[in-house]
Amino acid sequence: MCTRYLTPDQRAYEQAISHIPPFWKDFESHFDVRITNHVPVIRPAPDGGYIGEAMYWTLLPPRYDSKKAWRLPTFNLRAERLDESRMYATPFRLRRCLLPAAGFYEWPEIDGRKTRHCIRPAEAGLFFFAGLWNPYQSRDGSEADHSCGLITCDANPFMRPLHNTGGNKHRMPVILDWARGNRWLFGDTDEARELLAPCPDNWLMAYPVTRNAGDVPAQTEPAGEPVYG
DNA sequence: CCAGACGTTGTT
DNA sequence: GTCTGG
DNA sequence: CCAGACGTTGTT
DNA sequence: GTCTGG
């Protein structure tokens, strides 16, 4: 499902978040990020504020041979396994984060044809994927980084027809607004767990996009009528 | 006790 | 980092 | 013995 | 169709 998405532009950050970490200004707006790229992430600072920084998108164990050697697809993290998985349990308790996004893609099959759609916030300029992060160091010490993944849950009614293919259809990212995002970051584990649900349909809109690969503006440009949740 | 694992999605 | 299996 | 899986990529 | 795990 979610293997690439759009990061918000500066204006979307400014409208959604009153105090913007200086970091945002260094991050290219509306960049089409993919798994194994570095993506913008918000996490709590020790003083109670926020840290914004780039993290490697694919959650890694804190120690592993190398990033390249890690083959498991831990860029998406199933919400149902957060407590039970030995890889997720500790980050879920201690290292929750937010991945700001302006949209993501699905390739629904409509009338027998796969048509790429861009899914975006219906009203706000951005939303936040609920995520987990880990510190990371390669075994030989040559790589040091933070890694992260975003959490997935069952699709809401709006997303179901938009993610209707593959062995893992009918899933979607856990999408939060800024208020819920703060509870995700700063609440206790029980409060955080309650947020792991499909977002309301009316938070989302979608439209078909052209398949002009490599051309980011064209990919985000509507090529058909929008649909609102 | 040490060694090895640690997991999800879908492509134009 | 932490858990599991041997 | 039956039920379920059967697999790989990640830079367009 | 064949293998694996339970």
Image (cartoon, coloured by chain):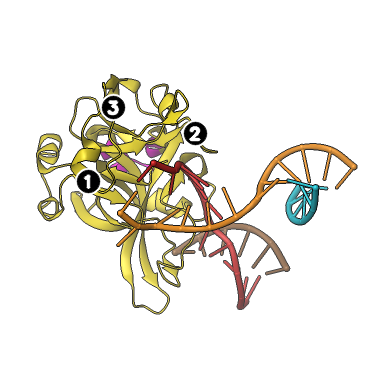
Chain colours: A yellow, B red, C brown, D orange, E cyan
Measure the C-alpha gap from mark 3 to mark 1.
17 Å
Identify the image quadrant of residue A178: top left
Marks 3/1 same chain: yes
Which residue sits at x=21%, y=39%?
A218
Give x and y (percent) for residue A201. Answer: 34, 22
Give x and y (percent) for residue A82. Answer: 48, 45
Report the residue marked by disc 1: A215
Identify the image quadrant of residue A144: bottom left
Residue stretch in magenta = A181-192
Asked which secondary structure carries label 2, the reply is loop
Residue A90 visible in image: yes
Q: Residues within 10 Å of mark 2 (few under 14, many from 20)?
A: some
Q: Residues within 10 Å of mark 1 (few under 14, many from 20)?
A: few
Report the residue marked by disc 3: A207
Give the side of residue A154 with respect to residue A212, left or right: right
The subunit carrying tag 2 is: A
Q: Amino acid at mark 2?
A: Thr
